Amino acid sequence: MVVVSTPDIAAIPLLPGFEPLVEAVGGNEHYLVAAKGAARLRLCLRAAPPQCPDCLIIQNDLCAAARLAAATRFERATRGLRLGPDRVASPSAYRRSRLALLLDIQDGIDAGMSPRDLAFGLVFPRHRPLAGATWKGSSERRHTLRLIADARRLVISGYRKLLRHD
């Protein structure tokens, strides 16, 4: 997210071609996610004293590198340069595959699949299904139950926000 200190917080500095997706106002800050095609810019506008020029604020914390990358993207957009995918804000390949697996597991639960069906249909598709007491005490069962709990937490916490990049 790019933090912009500006004297006129009501005047959103939308760049040509960018449209607001999400807006929220809280106290003296105005939050905005703007999009142009697949490119997204996340802005936080903070009120500054009159007569001050617009400034980008990069806090020196654990996210400083990500903030600097976001500020660079914002600066490129203000000059009308092409924006590629936002690799810093995008989930990694591992994270994407895990989220897809969790959503597949939730779809399976909604379709009435049992934990054993999920385990050997989605989680361990190359394993031979276990039966009886072997299944009850298996690490496959425990792992599958953890994934089911993660899938439920993902749905409860608002997984659809992933699609909007909020």
Image: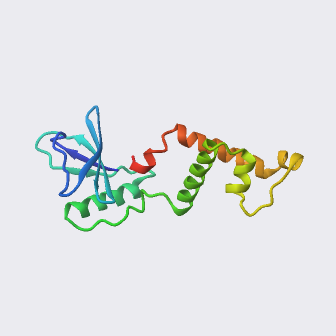
When the figure is inspected, residue 122 is found, relative to residue 142, above or below; the finding is: below
Could you tell me which residue is drawn at 53 percent across and 63 percent down?
93
Residue 67, horizontal then vertical, whole percent? 36, 54
Q: Position of residue 117 (x, y in %)?
A: 72, 50
Residue at 26% from the left image edge and 68% from the top image edge: 82
State which quadrant residue 160 falls in. top left
Q: Give percent across and percent down for residue 26.
A: 30, 33
> Which residue is most to the right?
133
Q: Is residue 84 above or below residue 2?
A: below
> Is 82 situated left or right of 147 in this image?
left
Can residue 165 be seen at all in this image of the molecule?
no
Q: Nearer the viewer, residue 64 or 74?
A: 74
Question: Outermost residue toward the left?
Answer: 51
User: Between residues 164 and 47, which one lies in front from this camera angle?
Assistant: 164
Q: Is residue 123 left or right of residue 4?
A: right
Residue 87 appearing in the image: yes
Residue under the image location 54 percent in, 37 percent down: 156
In the picture as drawn, the residue positioned furthest to the top comes out as: 27
Task: Name the residue at the front extreme.
Answer: 111
Residue 5 image-quadrant placement? top left
Which percent across, then down, holds residue 126?
A: 74, 64
Name the residue rendered at 25%, 41% in the picture. 46
